[in-house]
Amino acid sequence: MHFLDNLPLSVLVIAALTLGLAPFFPEPHIWEKLKMLVAGQLVKPVDIFDLAMHGAPWVLLLAKLARMAVARG
């Protein structure tokens, strides 16, 4: 977890808001892939890879926030 501790929170927020949501129009790509996942349509390897790449900044941000919360309490 040393890697996560060294990542600045601001960088993770910016990454999640830019890379995690790009492209912004007509809808964020991560949202489209999550809808495909819920509908059971996420079957192509390129779509799964796309979900992983657009979701990674969000996962890191949530992990960092959870780690910060645990460290405080």
Image (spheres, rainbow, N blue to C red):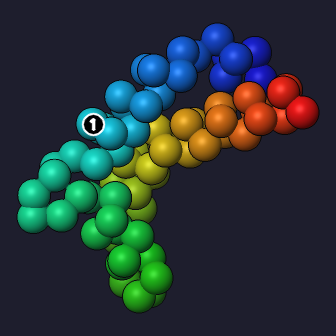
Kindly indicate the quadrant of the structure image that contains residue 69: top right
- Determine if residue 42 is in view: no
- Tell me: residue 16, above or below residue 5: below
Identify the residue at horizontal 60%, vertical 43% (top origin): 62
Residue type, mark 1 in image: Thr
Where, quadrant-wise, is the N terminus in this rendering? top right
The reply, left or right, for residue 26 in relation to residue 33 is left
Image position, residue 41 (x, y; %):
37, 83
Query: Nearest the camera: 72 or 18?
Result: 72
- Tell me: residue 20, above or below residue 3: below
How many marks do you count on the picture?
Answer: 1
Residue at the outermost front position: 73
Image position, residue 60 (x, y; %):
57, 36
Query: Nearest the camera: 58 or 66?
Result: 66
Query: Nearest the camera: 55 or 63?
Result: 63
Kindly indicate the quadrant of the structure image that contains residue 36: bottom left
Identify the residue at horizontal 47%, vertical 28% (top origin): 12
The reply, left or right, for residue 61 in relation to residue 38 is right
Q: Secondary structure at mark 1?
A: helix
Image position, residue 32 (x, y; %):
28, 69
Q: Residues within 10 Å of mark 1 (few under 14, many from 20)?
A: some
Residue that carries the numbered disc 1 in the rendered image:
18
Image position, residue 17 (x, y; %):
33, 39
The reply, left or right, for residue 14 in relation to residue 18 is right
Residue at the outermost bottom position: 39
- Tell me: residue 44, above or below residue 18: below
Identify the residue at horizontal 40%, vertical 70% (top origin): 34
Identify the residue at horizontal 84%, vertical 27% (top origin): 72
Residue at the outermost top position: 6
- Determine if residue 68 is in view: yes
